[in-house]
Each structure stands twice: as structure tokens, then as C-alpha cells.
Image: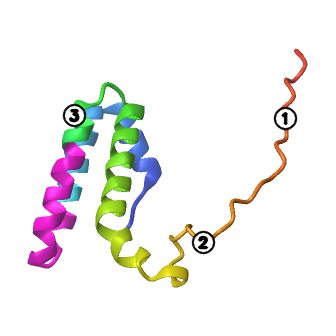
């Protein structure tokens, strides 16, 4: 599937309602192509994403809500399985030392 970012960005700027309608159509098309067992799970996930977007006051809040939702899903469903592999798991941080680094202060640029 080809994705033309500029085309989508222009559509979002010129006609936000058409952008949303096309976005929904494309998501539905992709999900319909999944095998039936994962299609149901994908539809449920998309429903949750849509509800978080609807509940949000602005796009940034939407992004944060969806990110938190995905992180919660990761730690409740995926991590317990993979994290139990101990040192072989790249997500297991229990045996790793916390690395410390130098903090470099940003200097405020002089007015031009």
C-alpha cells in the first residue's frame, strides 16, 4: 500500500471533514483485510482509539491518551509474557544499572 503523506496533509488542510471520512474508510479497509480472529481484536482496538480521540479536547491530548492506552496494553498483555524471560528480554530493566549522564544546559540565544 502506498501512502502519500503530502496528499493526506493537503487534504487535512483543505477539507478536514473529507480527510476524516477517508481516514476512517482506509482504516476499515485495512482491518477488513485481516484474518477473522485478529479482525475482531483490531476492530475493538480501533473503537477504543476512536473513543479516546472523541473524549480529547485537542490533538495533543488525544495523542497522550492513545499513547497511555497503548503503554497500558503493553504492560498488561505483552510484557508479563516476554518480561518473564529475564535477561533475554530487551524490555526487562530490573537487572540493569541506571546510567547517568551529564546534563548540558541550553543557552538562551541573544536577541538578533
- Mark 3 lies on residue: 54
Residue appearing at x 55%, y 81% in the figure: 87
Figure check: 32 above or below 43:
below
Which image quadrant: the C terminus?
top right
Which image quadrant: the N terminus?
bottom left
Figure check: 88 above or below 42:
below
Circle 3: is it few (<14), some (14-19), or many (20+) Cα within 10 Å?
A: few
Asked whether 26 or 78 is in front, the reply is: 78
Residue 33 x/y as whole percent:
17, 73
- Mark 2 lies on residue: 95
Q: CA distance from mark 3 to mark 1?
A: 39 Å
Residue 7 x/y as whole percent:
41, 49
Residue appearing at x 42%, y 43% in the figure: 9
| Quadrant in the picture for residue 14 | top left
Query: Magenta segment range?
Result: 29-50
Q: CA distance from mark 2 to mark 1?
A: 30 Å
Of the two numbered discs 3 and 1 on the same chain, state the one appearing first in sequence. 3
Q: As drawn, is 9 to the left or to the right of 36?
A: right
Q: Secondary structure at mark 3?
A: helix
Of the two numbered discs 3 and 2 on the same chain, state the one appearing first in sequence. 3
Residue 104 x/y as whole percent:
85, 41
The disc label shown at residue 105, or none: 1
Q: Secondary structure at mark 2?
A: loop
Asked whether 10 or 95 is in front, the reply is: 95
Residue 91 seen from this side:
yes
Amino acid at each position: 500500500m502506498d501512502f502519500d503523506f503530502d496528499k493526506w496533509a493537503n487534504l487535512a488542510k483543505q477539507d478536514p471533514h473529507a480527510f476524516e471520512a477517508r481516514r476512517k474508510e482506509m482504516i476499515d479497509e485495512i482491518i477488513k483485510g485481516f484474518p477473522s480472529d485478529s479482525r475482531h481484536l483490531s476492530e475493538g482496538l480501533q473503537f477504543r482509539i476512536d473513543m479516546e480521540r472523541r473524549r480529547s479536547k485537542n490533538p495533543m491530548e488525544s495523542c497522550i491518551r492513545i499513547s497511555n492506552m497503548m503503554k497500558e496494553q503493553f504492560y498488561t498483555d505483552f510484557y508479563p509474557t516476554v518480561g518473564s524471560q529475564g535477561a533475554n528480554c530487551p524490555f526487562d530493566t530490573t537487572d540493569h544499572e541506571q546510567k547517568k549522564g551529564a546534563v548540558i544546559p541550553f543557552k538562551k540565544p541573544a536577541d538578533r
